[in-house]
Image: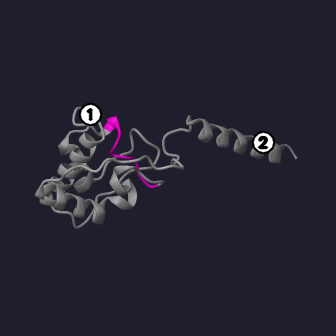
Amino acid sequence: MGGKTLTFGAAAILIALIASGLAPHGIADVTQPEVAQPKLSAKGIFGKLAYDKFCAECHGQNGTGTDKGPPFLHRYYLPGHHGDGAFHVAVTRGVRTHHWRFGDMKPVPGVTEMQVDMIVEYVRALQKANGLH
């Protein structure tokens, strides 16, 4: 009986945390924020295509994150914290989790350096259009 009470109590606390917005990083948000779409350069357009193919499944359409990966529309991914080179390292070598609780990111096969450059161009334009950068 005590185990069921503890389980229900833990569930109630988790629901309360999610509802209050204080849930720990790594628990997916229920609502997706409104995202301003940037005017993209040619490089940014190709970056969006590559992002949608290689990144969106985990990092969300428009960089909003999913239950598999964090959002790029966050201060952690601004150039002063994670520079453009960090994207190259993450894609080619993978990266250990250090800000979020999604687990380690494995390398992404099939993405060229040029595509990573274009993805970064798209992500930076998206960040800037949404007041980050």
- What residue is at 40 percent from the left and 38 percent from the top? 99
Q: Where is residue 79 in the image (x, y as percent from the top left)?
A: 22, 36
- What residue is at 43 percent from the left and 42 percent from the top? 100
**Left or right of 19 on screen, residue 123:** left
The residue wearing badge 2 is: 6
**Left or right of 34 on screen, residue 80:** left
Which residue type does callout 2 highlight?
A: Leu
Q: How crowded is mark 1: few (under 14 residues within 10 Å), some or many (20 or more)?
A: few
Magenta range is 68-76
Query: Is disc 1 placed on a helix, strand or loop?
Result: loop
Residue in the foreground of this view, choosing between 94 and 53 = 53
Quadrant containing the C terminus is top left
In the current view of this chain or complex, which residue is farthest to the right? 1
Q: Residues within 10 Å of mark 2 (few under 14, many from 20)?
A: few
Q: Where is residue 38 in the image (x, y as percent from the top left)?
A: 23, 49
Q: Where is residue 68 in the image (x, y as percent from the top left)?
A: 44, 55
Count of numbered badges drawn on the protein: 2
Relative to 49, say whether 124 is above or below. above
From the image, state whether disc 1 or disc 2 is nearer to you: 1
| Colour setting | one colour
Residue in the foreground of this view, choosing between 85 and 57 = 57
Q: Position of residue 121 (x, y in %)?
A: 17, 50
Q: Earlier in the sequence, mark 1 or mark 2?
A: 2
